Amino acid sequence: MLLKLARFAAWLLSAIFMILGFVNAEDPYRFFNWNVTYGDIYPLGVRQQGILINGQFPGPEIYSVTNDNLIINVHNSLPEPFLLSWNGIQQRRNSYQDGVYGTTCPIPPGKNFTYTLQVKDQIGSFFYFPSLQFHKAAGGFGGIKILSRPRIPVPFPEPAGDYTLLIGDWYKTNHTKLKAILDRGHRLPIPNAVLINGRGSNGTSFTFEQGKTYRLRISNVGLQNSLNFRIQGHKMKLVEVEGTHTMQTTFSELDIHVGQSYSVLVTADQPAQDYFVAVSTRFTKRVLTTTATLHYKNSNRPVSGQIPGGPTTQIAWSLNQARAIRTNLTASGPRPNPQGSYHYGLINISRTIKLESSAAQVDGKQRYAVNSVSFVPADTPLKIADYFKIGGVFRVGSISDSPPTGKKMYLDTSVMGADFRAFVEIVFQNHENVVQSWHIDGYAFWVVGMDGGVWTPASRNQYNLRDAVSRSTTQVYPKSWTAIYMALDNVGMWNVRTEFWARQYLGQQFYLRVYSPVESIRDEFPIPKNALLCGRAAGRQTRPL
């Protein structure tokens, strides 16, 4: 026991010294010490092997405030390499900490790595997840709350409580078997169920006091399905989406696509009893539904009546709801100035990038691609290879700005180059019959338009250039397009990926290399002193400790 305490004290001291060179002394820091293990979990009433963090499934919640420095020491007690990534955390000037294989060497079995994150100029609701080897299907995910600093006004009264709800589809099958199915070139079967905070139907509850208002932070941490969220007899007021305060629109149900996060306010304004919280899959032939319980503190009546039904396959309904989600221009964000101070609609576009997703067989195996390129990982993380200028690992420009005409799908380590401080338009084009969900690490972007059919330059006439929501994950409906604007103000190597996890695993992703020729610490932090080095970078030195 004394030896463990001594080791922890030594790690704590080294972590303090490690961060002093990178953080403002005025910004607080929070320390986390996590041990990642396999363990028995019972989300659907039968034993499964899950990934636990400090013995918890889901993992511990990260509570923080804007500009906090998060020092997270991760011990990998699994028998294989492991990484955590931080969905929506922008890693300003620091893509080395992003925790995907293109930026960060995996933590070897029995070893540890200390992430040094700063939630710089961010507020809102996010989550973390394991990014390697289909680990996400075994757990290892948890919520992230970033509160506003005390002097920054928030556009709603402080709620009586603040709950995190991690919702997502789930398989009974072990994640190693799911990975093996994909490795053999096959598609996965449909998931078995939907979970709320790691539990199946009626497995969890939330207590409200009558007359009071509560904040629910809802993240879809699943593998593929869009989910509809609703509460029996109650309305929800949307207040925040992935770090943006929204116009406070009231909904009775809310579509949350995979990888997305929303905050709603719910008032306990109904008779004192218990009510269903219902989550069900969208756009699926077979609808999977799960429930939790909203419990009034003074209730002595259990849930009763029918589980509230939600929309099933209606795309127009979901599209109209998405268009109704807009930025609150007068509210403060992470800084005191209003969110509407940045007039994105008045900035000239310097480049248009059109990304087209596809599915096909390559060498007899199922693969997925962007602009005909199906991504294959290199033997060395791309960011590490870039830092050490190791040739032959990747080629900038190995994916084009637009889908090539008539070219069959092929395999490559796809990297797209981009200039620091450019302002780009990105169009996601979906010709398939599935809803897609796209995420860009390191950034928030404005979702300026979405519609059915094929995007053309004339589609810009329907863009929202005033109060589009800014977020890091957006949906693309079947046979439809979604357009975003993005200011490339964050140097680094950033993963652009589908959140449909089997498709991501089988190649539907690439990396955006945002580059500044100045190579100044003003634009990007140097490689961390404690960075793990692997592949062709093994045996090299980072910087003196």
Image: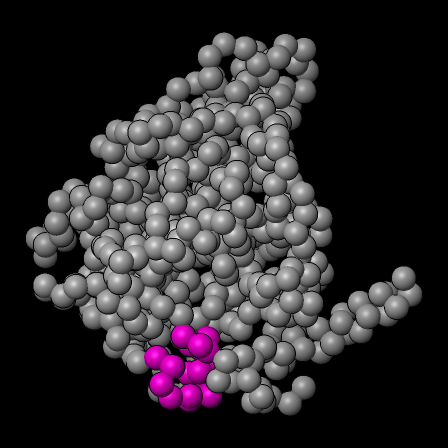
Whether 382 is among the magenta residues is yes
Q: Residue at x 61, y 30 (%)?
A: 45
Whether 123 is among the magenta residues is no
User: Residue 399: image x %, image y %?
Assistant: 24, 71
Q: For the C terminus, which image quadrant?
A: bottom right
User: Residue 180: image x %, image y %?
Assistant: 45, 54
Q: Which residues are magenta?
A: 378-394
Q: For the N terminus, which image quadrant?
A: bottom right
- Does residue 266 appear to the left or right of 183 in the view shown? right
Q: Residue at x 30, y 47 (%)?
A: 436
Q: Nearer the viewer, residue 449 or 502?
A: 502
User: Residue 101: image x %, image y %?
Assistant: 47, 68
Q: Where is residue 288, by image quadrant?
A: top left
Residue 480 can be seen, yes or no: no
Q: Nearer the viewer, residue 194 or 8?
A: 194
Query: In the displayed structure, would residue 223 be above or below residue 111?
Result: above
User: Residue 171: image x %, image y %?
Assistant: 49, 40
Residue 402 can be seen, yes or no: yes
Q: Residue at x 76, y 72 (%)?
A: 11
Query: In the displayed structure, would residue 171 be above or below residue 230?
Result: below
How are the colours assigned in the image?
one colour
Query: In the displayed structure, would residue 533 be above or below residue 308?
Result: below
